[in-house]
Image (cartoon, helix red, strand yellow):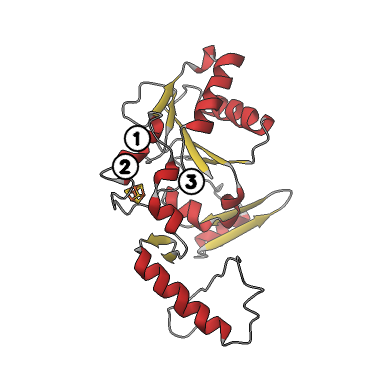
Amino acid sequence: MKIVSVAGTKKTGKTTLVTMLVSELVKRGFRVGTIKNAHRKLDIEGKDTWKHQKAGAQLVVGVGEETFFLVDEALELDTIIRKIECLRYLDFLVIEGFKRSPYPKIATSDLPGPLVLARVDVEKVDVDELKALADLVETRTFGLLANMDCQECGYSSCKEMSEAVVQGMTSEDVCVMKKLEKVVLTIDGKKIPLNPFIQKFVKNTFLGMVSSMKVDTDEIQDKKIELLIQNEDNR
Ligand code: SF4
């Protein structure tokens, strides 16, 4: 899944551009998700879900014609992406806001920085410009960074590699660590970098344990295996 942000100051047409971009990408056959940085409390004071949260619930789920989840803290963008399993099956994630995120941006106002893919005046965006923007999103964006700064790709850091993708000088496929990322460790939603040696060690040890549990090893070939450790007493 590749990520792009539409960022700029207030009332510069961010939501309009997000909807235009989503429509264009969907028209091209991609599965698209969105996240909006709302900068305010989302629940409405006095509503039942608000009362549930006020009572101390850490997670509140509201179910009606739609379903929404409320947690009692503002999560980091990467944490949200890693926690929401279904996001992994998308082709593109379009985020509104998060102008300081490490992902490529389409700026609706003056926004400096090497991660800016394009600057647009939303009121003047026509069909051709929208198509050109979607082309840029297809070719010059990338997904979650490995964030290991190992320099194996020839760049001095993941940040430098990501800037080169936005400039059209490379693609995220150069990231050796992403390809080697066969084992992912997250603690409370935060990814912990593992070098290839540790990944191999964990994988082999775990698969050895699984094969001793009367699990058909042929059946788990090429399958994703997840182990969750609740590292708290009394659970
Ligand atoms: S290979 Fe991947 S993890 Fe290493 S510096 Fe390059 S982008 Fe970052």
Count residues near mark 1 (Cα–Cα under 10 Å), then give few for <14, some for 14-19, many for 20+.
many
Q: Are marks 3 and 2 in contact (CB under 8 Å)?
A: no
Kindly state the secondary structure of the residue where label 2 is placed.
helix
Q: From the viewer's perspective, is residue 31 above or below residue 109?
A: below
First in sequence, mark 3 or 2: give its number.
3
Q: Looking at numbered disc 1 in the image, what kind of residue is underneath it?
A: Glu
Q: Where in the figure is residue 200, as x and y percent of width and height? A: 41, 70
Q: Looking at numbered disc 3 in the image, what kind of residue is underneath it?
A: Lys
Residue 213: quarter of image:
bottom right
Residue 216: quarter of image:
bottom right
Kindly state the secondary structure of the residue where label 1 is placed.
helix
- Left or right: 112 as drawn, with respect to 70: left
- In this orientation, which residue lies closer to the viewer: 11 or 50? 11
At x 55%, y 48%, the residue is 43
At x 53%, y 12%, the residue is 124
Q: Which residue is labeled 3 in the image?
A: 41
- In this orientation, which residue lies closer to the viewer: 169 or 43? 169
Which of label 3 and label 2 is nearer to you? 2
Q: Which residue is labeled 2 in the image?
A: 159
Q: From the viewer's perspective, is residue 82 above or below residue 209?
A: above
Q: Which residue is labeled 1 in the image?
A: 163
Seen from this angle, which residue lies furthest right?
A: 65
Q: Are marks 2 and 1 in contact (CB under 8 Å)?
A: yes
> In the rendered view of the protein, which quadrant contains the N terminus?
top right
Which of label 1 and label 3 is nearer to you? 1
Kindly state the secondary structure of the residue where label 3 is placed.
loop
